Image (spheres, helix red, strand yellow):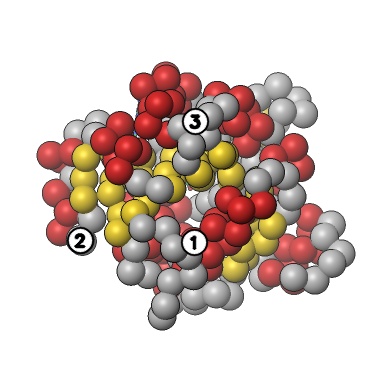
Amino acid sequence: MPKSTTVGRLAVIGTGKIGQAAGKLWLHAGYEVVFGSRNPAGAAALAELGATVATPVEAARAADVVLLAVPGETVEELLPSLADALAGKIVIDATNKIGFAEGRWVSTLEPGLTEGRWMAGQLPRSTVVRAFSHIPDELLWPRGTEQALYWAMAIAGDDRAAMATLTGLIHDAGWVPVDIGGLDESGHLDPGGSVFHLFYTEIEMREVVGLTVAA
Ligand SMILES: NC(=O)c1ccc[n+]([C@@H]2O[C@H](COP(=O)([O-])OP(=O)(O)OC[C@H]3O[C@@H](n4cnc5c(N)ncnc54)[C@H](OP(=O)(O)O)[C@@H]3O)[C@@H](O)[C@H]2O)c1
């Protein structure tokens, strides 16, 4: 299948559950992927898949678009070291600052602050968009491949050009992108949001998030 974007090389920072699944989906779609790991030598299995493995800074420098897939609790410590390498680039933020309270998953950010808006504040020289944040890791790869383009993924961002690129990347990863709006409206895809850890078709998701206009 031809790729939907002109993105040359993607970086995935973090080689855990979400990073590996997302990176493998893009490799599967024919993209060049460089993983950023604290221990590049320990990620030999990813190199065997056809990816490059480097340090997080090297990976961010080498790519046009960068997926952040590191723990929400520690991402703040990592960002200063990456900020220069991420400047001027599209940063796809999958990270969640997540807690569990009164029987529900919740964002640990202050009420009213979305994860995407928080990240954009940390990386003012980058174009931050949100994706992957509401999809449980164990189904990201199988649904993106065995049931490609049946399941919706909510995406959000303020920059139209970046959102067009993200739309193509999510489509090529085997998911149907549903643009739920700008970063300030993106709480739906954050912990505790209306689509968090849930699966919908595109039509269903549009209803759930209150989008009345068809794609
Ligand atoms: N799991 C899910 O279902 C899911 C779904 C949606 C979103 N998310 C979000 O996506 C992000 C990644 O989740 P995940 O489940 O993929 O996490 P994970 O399996 O724990 O992987 C996180 C990766 O981040 C890297 N990392 C960098 N700094 C780290 C640090 N100080 N401590 C630990 N790891 C560090 C590690 O890769 P290296 O060792 O290679 O550096 C690690 O493998 C989180 O913010 C999470 O909230 C998770």
Q: Position of residue 76 (x, y in %)?
A: 47, 22
Amino acid at circle 1? Leu
Number of the front mark, 2 or 3: 2
Q: Nearer the viewer, residue 122 or 75?
A: 122
First in sequence, mark 2 or 3: give its number. Answer: 2
Mark carried by residue 169: 1
Amino acid at circle 2? Gly
Residue at (52% x, 34% y) in the render: 126
Up-down relation of residue 179 to residue 69 (above or below): below
Q: Nearer the viewer, residue 118 or 84?
A: 84
Check the picture and name the quadrant holding the C terminus.
Answer: bottom right
**Residue assigned mark 3:** 72
Residue 198 seen by the camera:
no
Residue at (21% x, 45% y) in the render: 53
Residue at (43% x, 26% y) in the render: 83
Q: CA distance from mark 1 to mark 2?
A: 18 Å
Q: Is mark 3 within 8 Å of ligand 1?
A: yes
Mark carried by residue 14: none
First in sequence, mark 1 or 2: give its number. Answer: 2
Considering the numbered disc 1 on the image, is that residue within a helix, a strand or a loop?
helix
Mark 3 nearby-residue class (10 Å; few <14, some 14–19, many ≥20): some
Check the picture and name the quadrant holding the N terminus.
Answer: bottom left
Amino acid at circle 3? Gly
Up-down relation of residue 44 to residue 142 (above or below): above
Q: Is mark 2 within 8 Å of ligand 1?
A: no
Q: Position of residue 128 (x, y in %)?
A: 57, 39
Whether the residues at callouts 1 and 2 have beta carbons within 8 Å, the answer is no
Mark carried by residue 50: 2
Taking the image as four quarters, which one is ligand 1 found in? top left
